Amino acid sequence: PEPMSVCRDVIALEPGNVIVPREFLDIAYQIYNFEIRSDDVFVVTFPKSGTTWAQEMIWQITHHCDFEGGKVNLGARSPFLELPMLIPDHKLMPMVPKEKLLQAKRILELARSMPSPRVIKSHLPICFQPPNLLNRCKVVYLARTPKDCCVSYYHHEQLVPIHGYEGDFKSYASWFKRGQLLYGDYWFHLSEAVSRQGHPNLKIIWYEQMKKDLPGVLQETCTWLEQPLSDWSLKELVQHLSFDRFKSNSAVNNAALTNPKTGQCFIRRGKIGDWKNHFDTETSLEWDDWIQEKKREFKINNLF
Ligand code: A3P
């Protein structure tokens, strides 16, 4: 059994051997020429790093904690730049109404017509974003430690019907380690952000940091975005972003992505260290060596 990235018609982009569906070629030109506004904020992540959480955080900060407006589905408030490449033939996705699929295909048009400030989500590494992105607007890069990221990706690929991964975790982990899942190699993706660290328009946030000290991350991010929030709003936002509230918030926890058999949904466990429930000792030790080696190679020893 193979993950979707391998079943579908995919291509590997240079640099980095970044794996994307062939449909990327249909939108590459539009992404390259996507008109950036100076007050845009891009949320760029490797999949399953807590993208949705960070997106909602940034959307709320830039919209002065508009909890009423935040009841609209996050996908409509904060467009997913390369979504059209992920929407396959309708036959493969019969559970999604055709109009919705067409809407998703038109996401770039929607993004172009949206009022400022826009919060734009993308999983493409920074080198595949519109050129000079960092000199043109602010970018939040959210990262997550690789073992938990892999576990979350594994569940995601079981959950989403078009992915439908049926293999075991051990095999999945080896796909991840070889960089053969959609969006390719975890380390290449991370290094694309880390190598730009220090740019005033880039803020790297770790999922683990948000888990340990959400109020602290919020304060720092508000300062960086130059969007101060009152103490009351900050408190409300911490509540709004808490795991339990997030899980019951249908604007962010996409109900279409619930597995009818297991009841598992998109906002799954939200824990640090869930890898301990998935990795066997052999794979874990193998990954520890791999992680140390990659941290040295990409000079990110101090990060986690
Ligand atoms: P788990 O699968 O480990 O639970 P993404 O949005 O990039 O797809 O990331 C999804 C991951 O972020 C999932 O991880 C999800 O549970 C977690 N997540 C989403 N909202 C969260 C929140 N409010 N608090 C903690 N984790 C959250």
Image (spheres, helix red, strand yellow):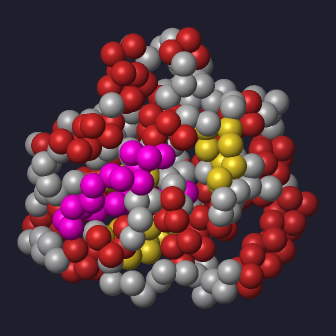
Residue 13 place in picture, x, y as percent: 65, 53
Tell me if 258 is positioned left or right of 5 in this view: left
> Per the image, is 272 magenta?
no
Q: Which residues are magenta?
A: 28-46
Residue 124 place in picture, x, y as percent: 51, 55
Tell me if 294 is positioned left or right of 160 in this view: right
Tell me if 264 is positioned left or right of 151 in this view: left
Residue 223 place in picture, x, y as percent: 21, 80
**Residue shown at 21% from the left, 67% from the top:** 38
Asked whether residue 64 appears in the rendered view, the answer is: yes
Asked whether residue 215 appears in the rendered view, the answer is: no
Would you place residue 36 above or below residue 194 in this image?
Answer: above
Q: Which quadrant does the C terminus fall into?
A: bottom right
**Residue shown at 87% from the left, 66% from the top:** 286
**Residue shown at 48% from the left, 46% from the top:** 28
Would you place residue 134 above or below residue 268 in this image?
Answer: below
Examine the image and state in which quarter residue 24 appears: top right
Q: How many marks?
A: 0
Would you place residue 219 above or below residue 114 in this image?
Answer: below
Residue sitting nearer the eye, 299 or 13? 13
Residue 42 place in picture, x, y as percent: 34, 60
